[in-house]
Amino acid sequence: QLRLVESGGGSVQPGGSLRLSCAAPGFTLSLYTIGWFRQVPGKAREGVSCISKSGSSTNYADSVKGRFTTTRDDAANTVYLQMNSLQPEDTAVYSCAPVRVVNMVTCTLNSEYNNWGQGTQVTVSS
């Protein structure tokens, strides 16, 4: 079964940046649209962004538009989430998930996915 592995999390001060990576050892990630999600304890998982198989189409939650950018590098078999201007409310465990077929309008919805990685912690505090 496809297993995604996230990395790149850490602790930063408000206004800082991090780049998360999503890899799929042994699988071809370019066959999937990839969604990024985040979750804090006691709250529902929130869709952050998604990127199409070709990388030509992306979608973002309003809360991260203009600050986060998702890209993919097929040669590296990796999808990235560049996070800039981080704020304390961005603190969460971030995970990625694959889907074969999805409407890009709804690709940030939890219901479109059923297989998330274990996630990487992002903490934003002063």
Image (cartoon, rainbow, N blue to C red):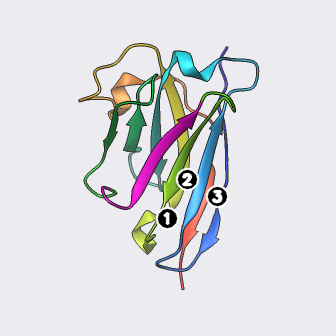
Seen from the viewer's position, the closer of residues 48 and 33 is: 33
The answer to whether the residue labelled 1 contacts the one labelled 3, judged by CB atoms less than 8 Å apart, is no
Q: Could you give the CA–CA distance between mark 2 and mark 1, rounded to whole angstroms?
A: 7 Å
Badge 1 amino acid: Thr
- Residue 69 among magenta residues: yes
Q: Position of residue 123 (x, y in %)?
A: 57, 68
Q: Could you give the CA–CA distance between mark 1 and mark 3, rounded to whole angstroms?
A: 10 Å
Q: Quadrant of residue 3?
A: top right
Per the image, the residue denoted by label 3 is 9
Per the image, the residue denoted by label 1 is 91
Q: Is residue 44 above or below residue 35?
A: below
The answer to whether the residue labelled 3 contacts the one labelled 2, judged by CB atoms less than 8 Å apart, is yes
Badge nearest the viewer, 3 or 2: 3
Q: Position of residue 36 (x, y in %)?
A: 47, 41
Q: Position of residue 89 (x, y in %)?
A: 40, 68
For the residue labelled by badge 3, is the local secondary structure a helix, a strand or a loop? loop
Badge nearest the viewer, 1 or 3: 3
Per the image, the residue denoted by label 2 is 93
